[in-house]
């Protein structure tokens, strides 16, 4: 056991592969360190051999193309997914992001991104509010 300033106790351990490495006591107790890094290296080599398959490469490229489009740091593909979400139980308009304001006596349209609600406007009729939401 070796003590390092501010790091707590570390142990000089021998990996199953034969290499030696220093491991913090907390990592050993929690079981988060299981090798010297050789397992990660083997996993990376395995992934490289799987990635050579053309079908997998095409699927990865398609996924990246779909998720790459961003607007002000927000993935637009995530917003597309949100459109298909189920309506909340208390939704009276039948459309996500459209509600009736009793106080203003108008339809309101809004969108929520990253837990921030953006008002898209107030409208006299429901159809105009729905169009603004789309």
Image (cartoon, rainbow, N blue to C red):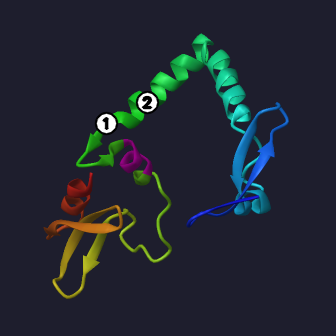
The vertical placement of 58 against 67, above or below, is: above
**Dominant secondary structure of the residues highlighted in magenta in the image:** helix
Residues 28 and 21: in front is 21
Q: Which mark is residue 128?
A: none
Q: Position of residue 68 (x, y in %)?
A: 36, 34
Q: Position of residue 35 (x, y in %)?
A: 76, 41
Q: Which numbered disc, 2 or 1, marks the residue that appears first in the sequence?
A: 2
Q: Residues within 10 Å of mark 2 (few under 14, many from 20)?
A: few
Q: Residues within 10 Å of mark 1 (few under 14, many from 20)?
A: few
The vertical placement of 40 against 9, above or below, is: above
Residue at position x 61%, y 18% in the image = 51
Q: Position of residue 89 (x, y in %)?
A: 50, 74
Residue at position x 43%, y 30% in the image = 64
Q: Which mark is residue 64?
A: 2
Residue at position x 40%, y 32% in the image = 66
Range of the magenta residues? 77-81
Identify residue for label 1.
Answer: 69
Disc 1 is placed on an element classified as: loop
Residues 10 and 77: in front is 10
The count of marks equals: 2
Residues 49 and 68: in front is 49
In this rendering, position of residue 23 left or right of residue 80: right
Q: Are marks 2 and 1 in contact (CB under 8 Å)?
A: no
The magenta stretch spans residue 128: no
The magenta stretch spans residue 78: yes
The vertical placement of 83 against 15, above or below, is: below
The vertical placement of 34 against 107, above or below, is: above
Disc 2 is placed on an element classified as: helix
Say which quarter of the image contains residue 16. Answer: top right
């Amino acid at each position: 056991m070796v003590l390092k300033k501010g790091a707590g106790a570390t142990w000089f351990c021998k990996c199953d592969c034969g290499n030696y490495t220093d491991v913090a006591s907390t990592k050993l107790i929690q079981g988060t360190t299981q090798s010297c890094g050789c397992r990660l290296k083997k996993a990376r080599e395995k992934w490289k051999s799987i990635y050579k398959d053309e079908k997998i490469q095409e699927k990865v490229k398609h996924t990246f193309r779909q998720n790459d489009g961003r607007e002000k740091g927000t993935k637009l593909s995530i917003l597309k997914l949100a459109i298909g979400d189920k309506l909340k139980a208390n939704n009276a308009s039948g459309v996500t992001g459209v509600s009736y304001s009793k106080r203003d006596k108008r339809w309101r349209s809004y969108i929520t991104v990253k837990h921030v609600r953006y008002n898209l406007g107030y409208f006299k009729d429901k159809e105009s509010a729905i169009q603004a939401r789309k």
